[in-house]
């Protein structure tokens, strides 16, 4: 029945709660209904403003604990992520390695994502360093995308598609949410599409210049899809970058290009952004993500390596409006001086005018008081 029908909402809520409980049997149906109440399935609140549509969904799982403070919500998210990640690998002794090992040594639950996969000849996922369910970071990514009610997620970059891209697609597809992932290498884009289709996901490649069209296509089809966007996220100028590197800019001096077009075409922005660049700090991309995508969750890989995106973690935590809800590291297959690759998952509370616990008053956003729960 129509989602807005007051008579269909209780049935819809029970159906959704039962579906979620089938994936997470340790959660009670009552608890799931609390989440749905927070998400607005059973509420009769005023329509959500467009700028808040994605944000409300991304914050619903935090609001389920019925606590108002940012630190308390962050702590609640940490507990949920830790429980999900731990339960997922309970039959694998909490493995944190690129080598998954033989099937008889590791028992994955039926709802677990598929393993990492490479279709390149004479290669293995482990030697390519693919983030998979056998790493704690991979499980945390999957749990974050699975638990938060998202309309879409953005990944920079896809690489081979057989690692984190597969994890995100698996978590988002059953929940009618789309994945947009940029990749600059044509061979990797083709490989990523093949990998995703191998696992039965609806995947398609598109020129990055048509990124906004991917959003429109997903909305028109009302179906989830993993979009591999081939090309640069930011319009390339004289030196290949944004306003500080000779790239294309708008009248306000902001960088333009596919990334901005994608986020502007997405109602409410993009709730979850995963940043895993190789030898690229995303110094040009982050201001666009911050201003136009407006995510409420970030996942950053290689936070301890130079010339990567770790500086974004420091920047957002310094604002006192973001919280680090999970972090860790895993061994590196590359010749790093540290021998470890660190990662971080961050979350920020809703602006006041978007909160599911208050009326839409248009009040200015409120910042958090502590950077970590």
Image (spheres, grey):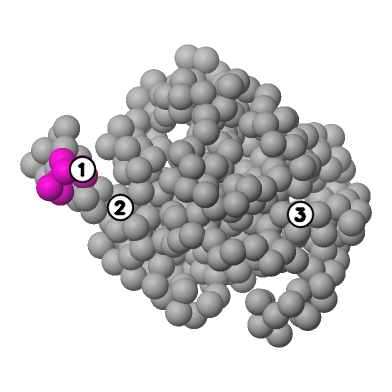
Q: Can residue 215 be seen in this view?
A: yes
Range drawn in magenta: 248-255
Is 30 or 218 nearer to us in this picture?
A: 30
Q: At which x and y percent is residue 184? A: 31, 51
Instruction: Say if 172 sits above or below 253 in the image.
Output: below
Is 323 or 145 nearer to us in this picture?
A: 323
The residue carrying mark 2 is 260
Is 238 or 68 nearer to us in this picture?
A: 68
Q: Quadrant of residue 332?
A: top right
Indicate the secondary structure of the residue bearing disc 2: helix
The residue carrying mark 1 is 254
Residue 183 among magenta residues: no
Q: At which x and y percent is residue 139? A: 69, 43
Q: Disc 2 versus disc 1: distance between alpha carbons? A: 10 Å
Q: Earlier in the sequence, mark 3 or mark 1?
A: 3
Mark 2 and mark 1 in contact? Answer it, CB < 8 Å. yes
Residue appearing at x 70%, y 80% in the figure: 5
Is 145 or 167 nearer to us in this picture?
A: 145
Residue 355: give its label: none
Q: Disc 3 versus disc 2: distance between alpha carbons? A: 31 Å
Q: Can residue 98 be seen in this view?
A: no
Indicate the secondary structure of the residue bearing disc 1: loop
Give the number of the mark in front: 3 or 1: 3
The residue carrying mark 3 is 35
**Label 3 Cα crowd, 10 Å radius (few <14 / some 14-19 / many 20+):** many
Give the number of the mark in front: 3 or 2: 3
Residue appearing at x 56%, y 65% in the figure: 47
Residue 251 among magenta residues: yes
């Amino acid at each position: 029945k129509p989602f807005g029908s007051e008579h269909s909402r209780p049935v819809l809520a029970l159906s959704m709660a039962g579906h979620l409980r089938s994936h997470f049997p340790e959660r009670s149906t009552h608890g799931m209904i609390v989440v749905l109440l927070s998400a607005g399935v059973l509420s009769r609140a005023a329509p959500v403003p467009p700028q808040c549509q994605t944000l409300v969904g991304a914050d619903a799982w935090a609001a389920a604990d019925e606590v108002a403070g940012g630190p308390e919500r962050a702590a609640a998210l940490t507990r949920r992520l830790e429980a999900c990640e731990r339960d997922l690998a309970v039959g694998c002794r909490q493995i944190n390695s690129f080598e998954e090992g033989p099937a008889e040594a590791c028992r994955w639950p039926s709802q677990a994502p598929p393993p990492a996969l490479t279709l390149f000849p004479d290669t293995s996922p482990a030697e390519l360093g693919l983030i998979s369910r056998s790493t704690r970071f991979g499980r945390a990514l999957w749990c974050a995308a699975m638990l938060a009610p998202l309309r879409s997620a953005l990944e920079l970059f896809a690489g081979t598609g057989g690692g984190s891209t597969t994890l995100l697609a698996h978590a988002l597809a059953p929940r009618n949410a789309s994945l947009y992932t940029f990749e600059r290498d044509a061979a990797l884009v083709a490989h990523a599409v093949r990998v995703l289709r191998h696992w039965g996901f609806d995947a398609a490649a598109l020129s990055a210049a048509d990124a906004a069209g991917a959003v429109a296509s997903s909305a028109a089809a009302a179906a989830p899809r993993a979009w591999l966007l081939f090309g640069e996220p930011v319009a390339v100028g004289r030196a290949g970058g944004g306003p500080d590197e000779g790239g294309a800019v708008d009248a306000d001096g902001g960088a333009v290009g596919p990334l901005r077009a994608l986020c502007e075409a997405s109602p409410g922005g993009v709730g979850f952004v995963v940043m895993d660049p190789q030898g690229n700090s995303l110094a040009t991309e982050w201001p666009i993500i911050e201003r136009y995508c407006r995510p409420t969750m970030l996942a950053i890989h290689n936070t301890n390596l130079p010339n990567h995106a770790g500086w974004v973690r420091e920047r957002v935590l310094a604002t006192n409006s973001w919280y680090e809800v999970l972090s860790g590291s895993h061994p590196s297959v590359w010749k790093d001086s540290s021998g470890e690759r660190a990662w971080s998952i961050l979350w920020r509370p809703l602006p006041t005018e978007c909160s599911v616990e208050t009326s839409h008053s248009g009040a200015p956003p409120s910042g958090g008081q502590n950077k970590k729960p």
